[in-house]
Amino acid sequence: MLAAALAFGIGLVSAPAPSAKPGGARKRILFFTKSSGFEHSVIKTSGAEPSHAAGVLTELARAHGWEVTHTKDGRVFTPESLATYGAVAFYTTGDLTTVGTDGHPAMTPAGKTALLDAVRGGTGFVGIHCATDTFHSGVPRLAPAGDHADPYVRMIGAEFIGHGKQQRARMICADPAFPGCAELKAGFELTEEWYAFKNLQKDLHVILAQETRGMDTAGKDGVYDRPPYPATWARRHGKGRVFYTGMGHREDVWTNPIFQSVLAGGLAWAMGEVQADVSPNVQKVTPGYAVISPEK
């Protein structure tokens, strides 16, 4: 599977762009998988063995000349530590300033500030799946928070509100020119745990959109009873490059060539190795993106 993914996406990575990061920092990725809330199976560890997601990401990164450091220890977030990475990738849940579910050390409030400052200063950020189920805004689940959304939510671009059952659904490719998406122009179908969002930022550059027509929308699947909405996107945050994909719940998605190509393209762009036009297009591509289905 990995070889197929590399063949699928490797040609999209152009010569590295100059970086302000010292030494080889641009090619280093911090993969942070602390679960203060629900812990997903793909990032659970057993003894010294890496999690499924960490193993796949490490192999994918190796093929692209990147180095991955994986940790669940929130104490890693200091200005000095963050300066050694070209990008930070999150697969996280909950309020990371609390120890929470997995028992690993929490991020300090100063560490959260350090992360947001680092991204604004030029460090790339890549959020995967439940990274939007992190640092919620403290308002009712379906209520928009507007300008009062948590600073992390505003940085990543949206806030998770729920999901229905895992089901096969279609992704619309809004930007096949984005790195990793050249072969996805016609869109694709995948079985996944699809996330629904609120507080979607107005400056998102939508790469993949959730096609809601044909999805089950009864009962707990009511979160999909809405127009198509962003599912994978990019945005600029100060000098930083922020990429997010809602895919990545299932083990078989992590080994899927499509997911690996999209993720590799997002990482390459976040670290400045490839360029892309990420002008806001959310209103054009998904004009009903702010519509949220009421509770059913």
Image (cartoon, helix red, strand yellow):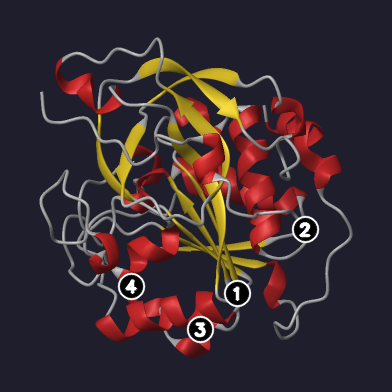
Residue lying furthest bottom: 80
Give the residue number, with chain letter if any, for mark 2: 275
Give the residue number, with chain letter if any, for mark 4: 74
Quote the CA–CA distance across marks 3 and 2.
26 Å
Q: Are marks 3 and 2 in contact (CB under 8 Å)?
A: no
Label 4 sits on what residue type?
A: Gly
Q: In the rendered view of the protein, which quadrant contains the C terminus?
A: top left
Mark 3: which secondary structure?
helix
Q: Earlier in the sequence, mark 3 or mark 2?
A: 3
Residue 62 vertical position relative to residue 137 in the rendered view, above or below = above
Q: Which quarter of the picture shows residue 35?
A: bottom left
Mark 1: which secondary structure?
loop
Quote the CA–CA distance across marks 4 and 1.
15 Å
User: Is 207 left or right of 22, judged from the image as shown?
Assistant: left
User: Is 74 left or right of 219, judged from the image as shown?
Assistant: right
Q: Which quarter of the picture shows residue 150?
A: bottom left
Where is residue 37? Give x, y as percent: 20, 52
Label 3 sits on what residue type?
A: Ser
Mark 4: which secondary structure?
helix
Give the residue number, with chain letter if any, for mark 1: 85
Q: Earlier in the sequence, mark 4 or mark 1?
A: 4
Label 2 sits on what residue type?
A: Gln
